[in-house]
């Protein structure tokens, strides 16, 4: 059996959903599990709605109306004015209605997961309805009943044993009769609350199902021809990789390559399941394959740019050396507040780290660190990582920018720039 994952760009409008159906039609004789993300920029819009609701911003209802209108327009273009899926989608949106009429819960991450998850629930309802409308036999399932996580909201930790038991119990029988359509990005707790697996986590969802089911392969369908050495929106003359090893793919995703979620690769590597990245507008194109034994050929350095970064510098209040005990306390604070370190550097008197700027987590981290340390930080920065770098390439990507921190090793260079 095969696992397919379609991102938001592939279902951003009615034509995208129609095209998705055409891609699927090429695999009628296969057992297929299809993982779908929220449509277009819906996750961003729901994040905006969540922030407005949490802050008590009166704009929350206007944002919600725009989200609903966007989806209903797609529904009308696909199905006309009447179809059972209209009620299914309305029932999902009612969940947000109920939530935003109440006072906000004091845990932003909890609220985030309960609201933002609606994007995937709605998109999969629409895609599943379209498949059946096109005479595919298709079954919608709620992923929250299969991917079981702890209560770490926005970064749910998967209970692999429980998850695989649930998946193996039901899914093979469903696949023998129909296409199975489910949501990316989401999980469920033992208390029946929704969790998310981290931004862009739909790739990880596909990886989890593939690993538990022993899939032949996973294909993630993108709006790019495969995995490129750099973002074509930022750099000219990008080149596509025909194949990559699991190890190189893990390195690239660790440093922030957004084409694949960082947690996707390891479960596939453990089960020796290849991952294909292919363009949804050219389904017969080769794309890129990540597999065991792939030969990595780097004609150009891999360039990864992460925006919205913060450089935080931490030192002892008495100007003493940064010791192992200091570092232990610092890392405990980072772990407590779920702040991932993208780059770090230690000097005699300070420890510096480059992190994603997630406001709620950053403020909590600052509050904890300031109890024992002096803290300085710069925000609105970029972190540029080059794998298999050259000195010329490093000079080119930093030209005209102020370099705050630079770090190089055998294969990797990282710079924080403003």
Image (spheres, rainbow, N blue to C red):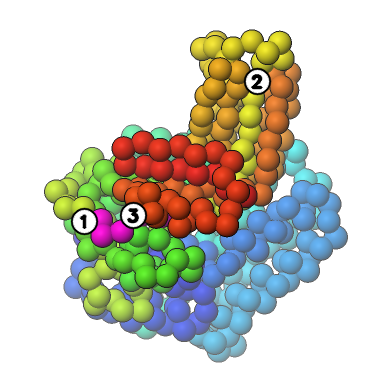
- Left or right: 116 as drawn, with respect to 255: right
Q: Residue at x 54, y 12 (%)?
A: 323
Secondary structure beneath disc 2?
strand
Q: Which residue is drawn at 23% across and 40% down?
A: 270
Q: Where is residue 296 in the image (x, y as percent from the top left)?
A: 21, 53
Q: Give the range drawn in magenta.
A: 298-305
User: How many numbered markers are drawn?
Assistant: 3
Secondary structure beneath disc 1?
loop
Q: Position of residue 185 (x, y in %)?
A: 48, 52
Of the image marks 1 and 2, the number of the one nearer the N terminus: 1
| Front residue (pair 293, 352) | 352
- Measured along the vertical axis of the image, is residue 253 above or below residue 173? above
Distance from disc 1 to disc 2, alpha carbons, whole Å, reads 42 Å
| Front residue (pair 396, 157) | 396
Q: Does the magenta stretch include residue 303?
A: yes
Q: From the image, tell me which residue sits under label 2.
A: 315
Q: Tell me if label 2 and label 3 are in contact, CB under 8 Å.
A: no
For residue 266, what is the image quadrant?
top left
Q: Assign the N terminus to one quadrant of the image.
A: bottom left
Distance from disc 2 to disc 3, alpha carbons, whole Å, reads 35 Å
- Measured along the vertical axis of the image, is residue 19 above or below residue 314? below
Q: Which residue lies furthest to the left in this view?
A: 293
| Front residue (pair 3, 346) | 346
Mark linked to residue 301: 3
Q: Which residue is drawn at 66% across and 72% down?
A: 68
Distance from disc 3 to disc 1, alpha carbons, whole Å, reads 10 Å
Q: Does the magenta stretch include residue 190?
A: no
Badge 1, how many Cα within 10 Å: few under 14, some, many 20+? few
Badge 3, how many Cα within 10 Å: few under 14, some, many 20+? many
Does any portion of residue 3 appear in the rendered image?
no
Secondary structure beneath disc 3?
loop
Q: From the image, tell me which residue sits under label 1.
A: 297
């Amino acid at each position: 059996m095969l696992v397919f994952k379609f991102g938001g760009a592939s279902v951003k409008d009615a034509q995208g959903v129609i095209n998705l159906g055409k891609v699927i039609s090429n695999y009628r004789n296969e057992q297929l599990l299809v993982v779908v993300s929220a449509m277009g920029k819906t996750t961003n819009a729901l994040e905006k709605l969540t922030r407005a609701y949490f802050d008590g911003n009166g704009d929350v209802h206007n944002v919600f109306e725009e989200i609903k209108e966007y989806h209903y327009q797609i529904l009308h273009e696909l199905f006309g004015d009447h179809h059972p899926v209209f009620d299914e989608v309305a029932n999902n949106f009612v969940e947000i209605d109920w939530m935003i009429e109440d006072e906000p819960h004091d845990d932003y991450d909890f609220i985030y997961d309960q609201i933002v998850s609606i994007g995937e629930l709605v998109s999969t309802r629409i895609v599943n309805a379209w498949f059946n409308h096109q005479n595919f036999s298709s079954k919608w399932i709620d992923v929250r009943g299969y991917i079981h996580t702890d209560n770490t909201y926005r970064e749910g930790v998967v209970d692999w044993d429980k998850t695989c038991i649930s998946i193996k119990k039901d899914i093979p029988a469903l696949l023998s009769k129909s296409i199975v359509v489910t949501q990316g990005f989401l999980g469920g707790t033992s208390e029946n609350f929704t969790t998310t697996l981290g931004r862009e986590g739909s790739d990880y969802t596909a990886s989890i199902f593939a690993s538990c089911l022993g899939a032949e392969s996973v294909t993630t369908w993108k709006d790019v021809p495969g995995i490129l050495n750099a973002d074509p929106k930022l750099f000219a003359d990008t080149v596509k990789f025909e194949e990559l090893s699991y190890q190189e793919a893990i390195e690239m995703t660790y440093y922030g390559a957004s084409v694949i979620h960082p947690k996707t690769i390891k479960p596939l590597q453990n089960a020796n399941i290849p991952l294909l990245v292919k363009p949804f507008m050219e389904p017969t194109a080769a794309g890129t394959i990540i597999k065991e034994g792939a030969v990595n050929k780097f004609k150009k350095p891999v360039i990864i740019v992460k925006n919205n970064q913060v450089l935080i510098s931490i030192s002892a209040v008495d100007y003493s050396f940064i010791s192992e005990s200091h570092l232990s306390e610092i890392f405990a604070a980072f772990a407590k507040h779920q702040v991932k370190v993208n780059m770090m550097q230690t000097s005699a008197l300070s420890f510096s780290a480059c992190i994603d700027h997630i406001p709620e987590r950053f403020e909590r981290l600052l509050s904890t660190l300031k109890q024992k340390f002096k803290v300085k930080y710069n925000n609105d920065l970029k972190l540029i990582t080059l794998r298999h770098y050259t000195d010329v390439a490093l000079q080119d990507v930093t030209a005209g920018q102020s370099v705050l921190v630079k770090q190089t090793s055998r294969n990797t260079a990282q710079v924080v720039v403003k």
